[in-house]
Structures are given as C-alpha cells and as structure tokens.
Amino acid sequence: MKTQKEAFTSLKGQFLIAMPQIDDLRFNKSVIYIYEHTRAGGAGIVINHPADRMSFVDILDQLKIEHPVLPNPPKIVLGGPDKFTNGFILHTSDYKTEETIFVADGISLTATQNILYDIARGRGPQKSLIALGCATWIGGQLEDELMSNVWLTASLDTASFLFDIPFSKRWETALSCLGIKAQYLSTECGQA
C-alpha cells in the first residue's frame, strides 16, 4: 500500500520518439507531439507520417468549403489511430478562438471546422499542421511504455519540428538532437 502520491511530471508540449523495438507498426519511427498529459491519460499527434493521399484542398472540397487557390496550403499527417474521423490542427498561437487550446512554446491546437474556413480565407494562423486522428493513452499507460523503453522523450524546437523539417527527416533529426545516431539504436531492449 502506497502512503504517498507518486510524483507526476506532465509531458505536455514534449515530443515522444519511437524506439526501434516498438511493437506497433502504426508508430514505427514516429515522432509524436504531446498536446495533453495528466494523471488521467495523454494525447498527442504523430507529426511525421504524411497523409500522401489527402490534401488540404481535398478536405475543403469534402466539407464543401469554398476557397481560392492557396499558395502554401497546410500539410496533412496521419495523427494517430484514435479519433481518426476527427481533424486536429496544431498551429502557431497567433490564432485563437474559444475552442483553441494553448499547448506550449507558442503552439496551440484547434479541432473545429472554423479554423479550416479561416485558413482557406487567409485569416488562419501563420503556420499550421493538420492531423487526421490522434494517439491517446489511458492513465499510467504512457508512463508504463516509457519505463519499457518504447519511447524517448525530448524538448525540441517545437515550431521547427511541427512546420519546417521534412516529414522523412523528423525521426532521425529528433534522435540527432538527443545526440543519438539512428543506426546505433538496437532493436533489443532491456533494463539495468
């Protein structure tokens, strides 16, 4: 029986980097931005799996949102296996509505259609990334996965990782920022 509450550190605003031994192919070489993490659980967006068959224009057309030709439309990622029919927009905090959630480091999340209208009309955030679905964990699950060496955690240059680095380079770049070379990671895990 525990007499003290265990210490809890929120990972909100941090990145998870998948280790090679992850046993869920949906997260192979994933980098996930955590936008919510409490004792009750967590949620994040996979930021490096592009939705190659879906564009911002496709989303606008499906939702029947009229739009001009957009010079730099936001990129679309497969944000995770949960709530896959929902869209989540990570964006710079220069855009805000009543539904917007501030995450950290000048990054916010909005999950309503209104932001899509605003982006289409040039009134949206300066930079954004649209995710189809998200990744979620129940209370204690993420902490267990961290103890099992499934993920590394990192504080990275948030805006750069979300909006500037090419998808294909995000996993290796995230590891490199921790001083780790991907080719030296083992697929075997263990604990000392």
Image (cartoon, rainbow, N blue to C red):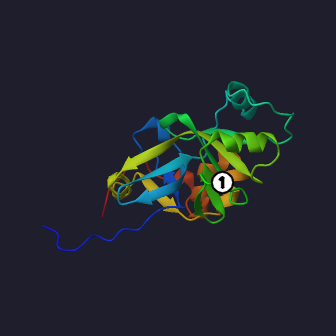
* SS for callout 1: loop
133 lies left or right of 168 = left
The crowding category of the residue bearing disc 1, from other C-alpha atoms within 10 Å (few below 14, some 14 to 19, many at least 20), is few
Tell me where residue 102 sits by quadrant. bottom right
For the residue pair 99 and 129, the one nearer the viewer reads as 99
- In the displayed structure, would residue 176 be above or below residue 141? below
Residue type, label 1: Thr
Which residue of the protein is positioned furthest toward the bottom in this rendering?
A: 4
Q: Position of residue 62 (x, y in %)?
A: 68, 25
The residue nearer to you, when weighing 107 against 167, is 107
Residue carrying label 1: 97
Placement of 19 over or under 55, stated as above or below = below
Residue 30, position as x, y percentages in the image: 53, 46
- Residue 76: where, in percent of width, then height? 67, 38
Q: Say if residue 190 shows up in the picture.
A: yes
Image: 26 above or below 32: above
Q: Quadrant of residue 52?
A: top right
